[in-house]
């Protein structure tokens, strides 16, 4: 089974914040798969299961706060046939310009606390693919990063964000196609 984890913070107060870019991509992938969200409280997650490009996919939005995302990811791996080798994490990235989208097959957390939590929940050295959605940094360097990532996007950013979400979902589907071509199990 393929698992795609979109990272964000749960709750209405965080819905339109930069830190929730991963949730937006997860919503787009669930829409494309024709899947509905359901709560899995024991796993601290919302899940949508469907099919993309002929492959069964489990789209997951951890319902922990960002810094504890690894708890939900670990629960999914412990209770499903999903495994890191056939999994992808989507999250916001302040070190990329707003709207940029980048794919990596593995690597460090790069300062992202959600990704750090996931890597800490996995056996040391485990590779997991990721798509990073650029949220940029504040033009005013006096704005604390925590305030920036938890800040709401502007109307101008929203136009760019919609395109970035679509491109990030496209990148996730390309990754899935490559897995399929390499013969990964579903």
Image (cartoon, helix red, strand yellow):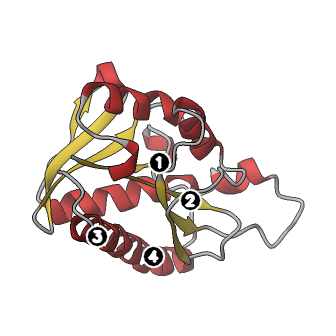
Q: Image point 25% across, 40% down: which residue?
A: 47
Asked if 88 appears above or below 124 in the picture, the reply is below
Residue holding disc 4: 164
Residue holding disc 2: 92
Residue holding disc 3: 173
User: In the rendered structure, are the residues bearing label 2 and label 1 in contact, judged by CB atoms less than 8 Å apart?
Assistant: yes
Residue holding disc 1: 7
Mark 4 element type: helix
Q: Can residue 56 be seen in this view?
A: yes
Asked if residue 77 lies left or right of residue 64, the reply is left
Q: Image point 70% across, 55% down: which residue?
A: 110
Q: Mark 3 or mark 2, which is nearer to you?
A: 3
Dot 4 crowding, Cα within 10 Å, few <14, some 14–19, many 20+: many
Q: Image point 74% across, 67% down: which residue?
A: 137
Q: Earlier in the sequence, mark 3 or mark 1?
A: 1
Distance Cα–Cα, label 4 vs label 3 = 14 Å
Q: Earlier in the sequence, mark 3 or mark 2?
A: 2
Q: Position of residue 169 (x, y in %)?
A: 34, 69
Asked if residue 74 lies left or right of residue 2, the reply is right
Q: Earlier in the sequence, mark 2 or mark 1?
A: 1
Distance Cα–Cα, label 4 vs label 2 = 11 Å
Q: Quadrant of residue 167?
A: bottom left
């Amino acid at each position: 089974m393929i698992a795609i984890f979109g990272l964000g913070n749960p709750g209405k107060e965080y819905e339109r914040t930069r830190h929730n870019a991963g949730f937006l991509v997860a919503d787009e992938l669930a829409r494309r798969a024709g899947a509905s969200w359901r709560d899995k409280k024991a796993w601290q997650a919302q899940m949508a299961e469907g099919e993309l490009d002929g492959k069964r996919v489990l789209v997951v939005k951890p319902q922990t706060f960002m810094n504890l995302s690894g708890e939900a990811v670990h629960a999914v791996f412990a209770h499903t046939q999903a495994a890191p080798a056939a999994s992808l994490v989507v999250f916001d990235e302040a070190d990329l310009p707003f709207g940029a989208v980048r794919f990596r097959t593995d690597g460090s957390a790069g300062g992202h606390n959600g990704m750090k939590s996931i890597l800490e929940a996995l056996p040391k050295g485990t590779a997991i693919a990721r798509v990073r959605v650029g949220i940029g940094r504040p033009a005013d360097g006096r704005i604390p990063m925590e305030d920036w990532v938890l800040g709401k996007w502007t109307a101008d950013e929203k136009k760019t964000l919609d395109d970035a979400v679509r491109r990030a979902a496209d990148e996730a589907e390309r990754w899935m196609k490559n897995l399929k071509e390499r013969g990964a199990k579903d």
